[in-house]
Amino acid sequence: MIAIARSEFIRIWRPSFRYGGIGLMAGFAALISVFIFTSLEDSSATATTAAPGPGGAFATAAEIAEPGGFLIPLGTVSDLAGIVLLSLWAIAAASDYESGLIRVLVQAQPNRMKLLTGKIIALTGFTMLATWVTTLTVVLVARPLARLQGIPMDAWPTDAAQLILSGYFNFMVPGVVWGLIGLLIAVWTRSSGIAIASGIGYLLIVESLIGIVLPDIIDYLPGGTLGALAAGGTENLAWSAALGLTVAYGAAAAGAALLIFRQRDIIS
């Protein structure tokens, strides 16, 4: 299993994934941080915007000044990072079919469960690294932006390490689950394009439409649940419930992908 995961990681660790994936996520993190910090009405610690709250596109200066307030942009970055990771996992899975490499891989390792599990382990490792770099980007740009906006930072050192690790965990776990969803669609359709379009379409359109018709269940759908976990919990969905549902969605996606990969004939 270790050899399979190492082999998969070597293939994943190519410039398009390193710079196009990690670089894109870090770029989104920096851009969103700038937007959130500069969208405050003024530089006072009591100023508010029209849509406050962690995990939203806006926050109050008072919230940012609190311990761990420098991590507020992660809640907004989560959806964009989820799209990037879903796309990368889908490309990693579907490209084997599209290039015909899947035949060689299956011949070299007939145990398909081990083969796909090794890919999942490798992609999970990549996701952990990508989300860590993104988290550090948010942390590093927070201080100069706060100084620019005149936001007090005296409370930031309080439990900073613990809060950073907690924020990273809440950001990383949804990222892995978005990746597993992309992997499932790619294994099912054998097409990275269909997988990416389906995932993005669901996140941006389908859940929004469901939320209009059935607003009470929106927090329990994948997008709402993963977003709630990234925000550290919401009024409608506690952190523990969001974590449990997120793990359940991830386990279901991984299990379905393994079952499809094991049973389906390799014809491409």
Image: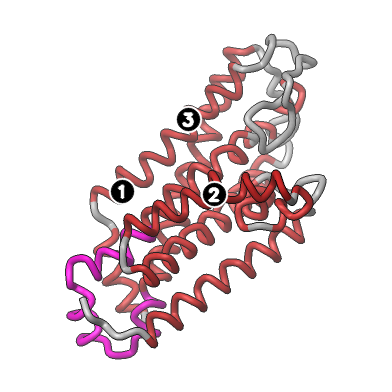
Say which residue appears at 82% left-offset and 45% top-offset.
235
User: Residue 136 bears which disc, if any?
Assistant: none
Secondary structure mostly seen in magenta is: helix
Q: Is residue 1 left or right of residue 212?
A: left
Magenta includes 153?
A: no
Magenta includes 117?
A: yes
Q: CA distance from mark 3 to mark 2?
A: 22 Å
Say which residue appears at 43% left-offset and 53% top-offset.
85
Q: Which residue is mark 3?
A: 30
Q: Is 62 or 52 nearer to us in this picture?
A: 52
> Which is closer to the viewer, label 2 or label 1?
2
Q: Amino acid at mark 2?
A: Leu
Spot occupied by residue 217 in the image (x, y as percentages of width and height):
74, 55
Does label 3 or label 2 sit earlier along the sequence? 3
Q: Amino acid at mark 3?
A: Ala
Spot occupied by residue 253 in the image (x, y as percentages of width and height):
52, 70
Q: Is residue 11 left or right of residue 78?
A: left
Q: Which residue is mark 1?
A: 18
Q: Which secondary structure, mark 2?
A: helix
Spot occupied by residue 52 in the image (x, y as percentages of width and height):
74, 27
Q: Is 189 or 67 nearer to us in this picture?
A: 189
Q: Are circles 2 and 1 on residues that touch, CB within 8 Å?
A: no
Q: Quadrant of the C terminus?
A: bottom left
Say which residue appears at 44% left-offset and 61% top-offset.
182
Residue 163 found in image quarter: top right
